[in-house]
Image (spheres, rainbow, N blue to C red):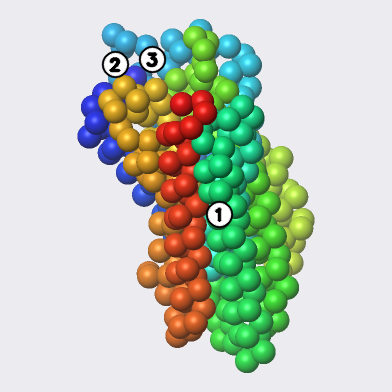
Amino acid sequence: MILPSTYSGAILCLVVSLLCLGSWANLLKASGKWRYELFYLDFSLGAGLLAILAATTLGSLNSKELTFQDNLLIAGYRKMAYAAAAGAVANAANLLLAGAISVLPLSVAYPIAGGVGLAVGVVWMLFPPQGNVALLVGGGLVLLVAVAVGAITYGAYARNRANTGKMPVSNPRGLSRGSPTRSKPGSDSGIALSLISGVALGMVPPLLSLSRTDQDGLAAYSAGLIFGLALLGSTVLFAPFFFAFPVRGEPVHVAEYLKGSKIQHLSGFLAGALWIAGSIAGFTTWGTLSAIQIHDQLSAALVDGAPILAALWGLLVWREFRGNGRELARMAATLILWVAGASLLAIATSSGPGK
């Protein structure tokens, strides 16, 4: 397996992880009127195929050391089941997040989901304590405050836009820009999807951690392979539900997938490839960070910063909330609170009980 063995190599992997996980949603935003449910079919295909490619190349190149095939031979079935469960849960979280992004600004949906995910992770870290308990609880509460501020800010913004007959910044699939619409219901459903997505996201790290512990645990590329294939396979189970009960608009028929353009299909495929590439890049640093003495806070900032990067894409590139100085200021405050909460968690895990 090709794994980072130096400080700069591990930092590079974490930066790649941050960029990929924080940027894939731009391709969903750029897909225009293409329904997110159809976009996600290509997303899961791209994720599954790249997971296979990564395992059979980077996971096999250094044959003098452990390859992903060797690791799968010695890995326990329970460890594989944990990785598969993590992939299926992550898939549900991504589907919900994609649905939220289809009706909410990227700068609202992703930080809400990511903030709730980190807050849910605090619960796992408290039993048993994996750091300073007071800082863990404080960081989780600050993150929840950030989530609440973001949700309230967008709710007020959406109501104001609805009252003036203007379209919210995030263009729901299938509706033309500038057409009057009642945006409040869409904002409510989008926020709800983001919250549920966050709960699912918070369950993924503990499952992955269980998959790699002990001598029969999974290594980076074998875990990435099972993780990606579980995501692809579980899409077959999840997609029909989202097709039948769309966030907005009429139910989706699978036949509509064949009507997509090459650009639309490619966007979904690349988004999935980016997401799994970011995930596997993070996996490659398992067990190496402490050995090469990367500071816990720096590692946490790079691992957990994807929602902030996505929000910056939304605010600075897609110019969500443009021309609305008050809401923009509140969103900036939301991101500051979010960073403060995540920072408290990073400090907590490097101090206190369990360290």
Residue drawn at point x = 45 percent, y = 55 percent = 340
Q: Where is residue 106 shown, x and y percent of the image?
A: 51, 64
Which residue carries the number 1 mark? 143
Q: Residues within 10 Å of mark 2 (few under 14, many from 20)?
A: few
Q: Which mark is residue 67?
A: 3
Nearer the observer, disc 1 or disc 3? 1
Q: Amino acid at mark 2?
A: Asn
Split into 4 quadrants, where in the image is the N terminus? top left
Q: Which amino acid is tagged 1?
A: Leu
| Residue at 43% from the left image edge and 30% from the top image edge | 283
* Crowding near the residue tagged with mark 1, few <14, some 14–19, many ≥20 C-alpha atoms within 10 Å: many
Mark closest to the chain's N terminus, 3 or 2 = 2
- Verify CB contact (< 8 Å) between mark 3 and mark 2: yes
Q: CA distance from mark 3 to mark 2?
A: 7 Å
Residue 219: x and y in percent read 45, 20
Write down the residue under mark 2: 62
Position of residue 46 in the picture relative to residue 9 (left or right)? right
When the figure is inspected, residue 331 is found, relative to residue 14, above or below; the finding is below
* Nearest to the observer: residue 347 or residue 3: 347
Specify which label sits upstream in the sequence, 1 or 3: 3
